[in-house]
Amino acid sequence: MHSFSNKEISDMLSEYTDLMKIFDENKYRVRAYDNASRIVSDRTIDLEKRVKENNLEEINGIGEGIAGTIKDIFEKGYCEPLEELRENLPAGFEELLNIPGLGPKTAGKFLEEMEIKNIEDLKKALQNGEIRKLKGMGAKTEENLLEALKEYQEYTNYINLDQALETSQKLIKKLKDNSDEILKIVTAGSTRRKKIKIGDIDILISVEDKKDHNLIETIRNLDEVQDILLEGDTKISVRTKEGLQVDFRMVTDKEYPAALMYFTGSKYHNVRLRQIAKDKNYKLNEYGVFEGEKRLEASSEAEIYELLDLKYIEPEIREDKGEIEAAQNVELPQLITLDDINGDFHVHSNYSDGALSIEGMVEAAKDRGYKTLAFTDHSQSLNIANGLSVERVKKQWKEIEKIREKHPDFLILKGIEVDIKKDGTLDYEDEILEGFDIVIASVHNNFNLPADEMTARIIKAMENPYVKILGHPTGRMLGNRTPFDFDYDQVLETAKEHDVILEINSSPSRFDLNDEMAMDAIRSGVKLTINTDAHHPDQYNYMQYGIYIARRAWAEKENIVNTYSPEQLKKQFEVN
């Protein structure tokens, strides 16, 4: 019997789903496998144990056929129906499915009608204007696909913040476990500034003697290392087996504070600091702060900032976007922290496409120290996510009422993530919307509308008096779908006028809003919420990524409604 992680099984089922769409297989079978791929991603389910005990079908959403496929994977070491479909596709074709906005059916149409077999074929067809000749494909589609292809090719040169953090933390732990020469070790660069996209990873290490140590050899021998790109006495750059570039730098303990500052700040932040140092007749570089040839004592970054008559600047905002002036004038924001968060307002249960019951999600939230949770399952039109009919909405309300009685010290809000239809109307009538404590309005389809139509669509939804939050406002899926085109300034004006809160969706697949848009919202006086879009309690951990985005946007506690007390929330959402 072979061994597979839940993620590996989930990825196989997800890929099988995509290929079935290309071959236009039964839509109910496609939907079942798509749903199953999400279910088995739940790491609390021991798939291998269930296969051995022959009880896969006891998992809600896993029928006899899918259970057979999963069992087959463990027994054979591969997904046989997936391999059969792969064999009928040209080499390189599946990469087309990674292009934002290019779905399996469209890719299949390109293959069948134009013999577009790979990325290069698509690029040529777009540049030659051939795509617009197909029925249903016009100049706008061609323009969108060209932009999406460009975005995809740029994106493949970057990794997401969550992956960068996971990789750097794993490497740091490995080095600590394998070397007693390390005095201090930390992730620097854009990863420490918590940028959403990371080009490469920087790891800074302090040692007793940077010219005499065995760390280079230790790094070379790490299991994760595939290739050595550059090597010296104090630096080694490697490519990991995942294809990521990691730069390790060794410094002495006295150099460490200045090196950490230098290798953390953006280029423009560092230029400003060096100029300030120069104006004081100092020299600032990665080795320290010098007055003539003398290195000034500084045991931390904070002490270096103090030497420059600046208040300490948090890593996330070292971008030369006004932080230097704010530090000079003692006007730096008190950035929000994870400890400030009291709850999550975008959570899914097994009423739609979540993994656990309402009570299971509540208990996990209480374990985190939360004081409130809003259940916002999908509305009726989103069939693929088991959207709630009006009857099931009312059933859920009754269950929430019962669970509230069991948890009187915890604020449970009746919510919904309601689809914004193409014309801006919502997926339920107002008489149903009125019964929710929180309504999140989100766009889940028709992403390619012209900017004016998309803007009007979103604004119309926000003008509904029951809408409290605009969910994942740009609609992007990182590496899969670009943001849709709309007038963000108009949306901000509407949000302020109607007291609609904008969401920072901290799921690593979205990171939406980004930091710049979140900063614009704050400056416009629009409130924000950081939500995880959790479908399982493990995903509550995504909150940290939303915090990073908010910190980069200069958000303080009062800007984020998740920091409110239950009493403040009841007032904000007009809950009795």
Image (cartoon, rainbow, N blue to C red):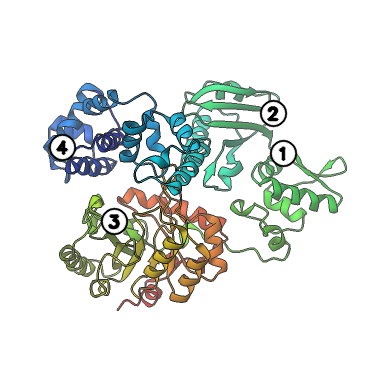
The x, y position of residue 85, in whole percent, is 25, 27
Earlier-in-chain disc, 2 versus 4: 4
Q: CA distance from mark 3 to mark 4?
A: 23 Å
Residue type (three-letter) at the residue carrying disc 1: Glu
Q: Which residue is mark 2?
A: 210
Q: Which residue is mark 4?
A: 56
Query: Comparing marks 3 and 2, which lies closer to the viewer?
Result: 3
Horizontal side of 392 relative to 415 (left or right) equals left
In front here: 562 or 69? 69
Residue type (three-letter) at the residue carrying disc 4: Leu
Horizontal side of 105 relative to 51 (left or right) equals right
Residue 267 against residue 65 in the figure, above or below: below
Question: Secondary structure beneath disc 2?
Answer: loop
Q: CA distance from mark 3 to mark 2?
A: 51 Å
Residue 371 against residue 481 in the figure, above or below: below
In front here: 128 or 295? 128
Q: Is residue 450 visible?
A: yes
Tag 1 and tag 2, C-beta contact below 8 Å: yes
Horizontal side of 462 relative to 153 (left or right) equals left
Earlier-in-chain disc, 3 versus 2: 2
Tell me where residue 31 sits by quadrant: top left
In front here: 522 or 143? 143
Tell me where residue 555 sits by quadrant: bottom right
Question: Secondary structure beneath disc 3?
Answer: loop
Earlier-in-chain disc, 1 versus 4: 4
Most extreme residue toward the front, as rendered? 133
Q: CA distance from mark 2 to mark 4?
A: 55 Å
Residue 348, numbered circle = 3
Question: Secondary structure beneath disc 1?
Answer: loop
